[in-house]
Amino acid sequence: MSQDHRSRALCLLGATGSIGVSTLSVAAHLGIPVFAVSAHSKVDLLATQARACGAKVAVICDPARYDELKRALAGSGIRAAAGPAALEEIAAAPEVGAVMTAIVGAAGLPATLAAVRAGKRLCIANKEPLVMAGDLIMAEAKASGAAILPVDSEHSAIFQCLENHGADEVRELVLTASGGPFRTVADLSQVTREQALKHPTWTMGPKITIDSATLMNKSLEVIEARWLFGIEPERIRVIIHPQSVVHSMVSYRDGSVMAQLGLPDMRVPIQYALTWPRHEGGEVGIPDFAKLVALTFEEPDTARFPSLTMAYHAARVGGLAPAVMNAANEMAVAAFLAGRSRFIDIFRTVEDALSRTPALRSPSLSDIIAADADVRARLAN
């Protein structure tokens, strides 16, 4: 799906979130047909989106809301479906050329694997599948010929900087991070939910916004980058860049550094994933460089934000550690958003879960799913 991206339809997993809404905007702008859309529980919005984009199928993840979705789609000709199996079905459907996966958390893993096994172009906007099962996913992609295109702005930037270059040419990958709303806040013990949800540059859903505030978002990106680009963790660096104009960089062995710049708008990496290898006319402009006062960079403070230290540990240990880290973080963020714990408890919860991780060098998918479920069950009590 490059120059012929309009000839094969899109399956959008996670249509009602911020990435999903932006993807529908990009698809409409480019004239890409949408075959299927899904949502976790927002029935009315999903039905409205499905009608507006002309989708053939709409899937609600919660099976208990199937009848509600069916009623919302009555008379539209759009087929309603529900449950995890339906997500896998639309991700692998023969009508689909590209799958945009934007489901928050581990719930998107089975559908992601279904798309990869079907040889689709996988535009991956959710980090969790590669964090949990990166080795398995990349092996399946190699076997099926599926193309995996990153949608995270940082990974999209690195992907673009790496085109036509091999991993053996790379000195290090440099992931930039905004630093979140608490970059200069010394005491994190009194952080409130409302403060944590006010990101200084990006507009995102609540879970990823909290992850940005803890730097866990960047931590997950380190593990994801390890699999996407075949670069060991020791050659992946994180640097704080508050302006969010330089989206990431690649440092080469000859001393060259390539960076990708742009406005902090997710429609740019979304569009490139859909139109690759072409940069077509889009909806977003470019930065006015004459008005940029400064672009600044600084080292992350791992003492206040230990997420990065934990991520490098999980990446080096491998096995079940990344899946355990991800599951513990999801549960800890949910507890914080629900008012059941403090912001700093997120770090403590993840660290404790990692300390309990059983050693297993090459876990199967069932091992990974079981470890994920075990962490969630323990932290739900």
Image (tube, grey):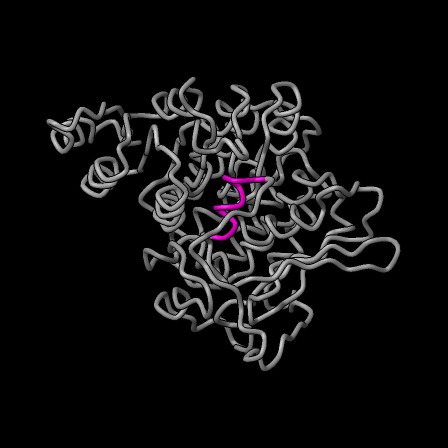
Which residue appears farthest toward the bottom when viewing the image? 293
36 or 223, nearer to the observer: 36
* Magenta segment includes 187: no
Percent x, y of residue 50: 25, 35
Q: Over which residues does the magenta segment extend?
A: 268-276
Percent x, y of residue 262: 56, 62
9 or 219, nearer to the observer: 9
Q: Main secondary structure of the magenta part?
A: helix
75 or 372, nearer to the observer: 75
Lateral position of residue 220 relative to residue 168, left or right: left
Image quarter of the C terminus? top left
- Quadrant of res 119: top right
For the point 52% across and 77% down, the residue is 185
Q: Is residue 43 above or below residue 171?
A: above
- Quadrant of res 347: bottom right
For the point 66% across and 50% down, the residue is 158
Q: Is residue 225 above or below residue 366?
A: below
For the point 52% across and 64% down, the residue is 286
Percent x, y of residue 235: 78, 51
- Quadrant of res 226: top right
Percent x, y of residue 292: 57, 78
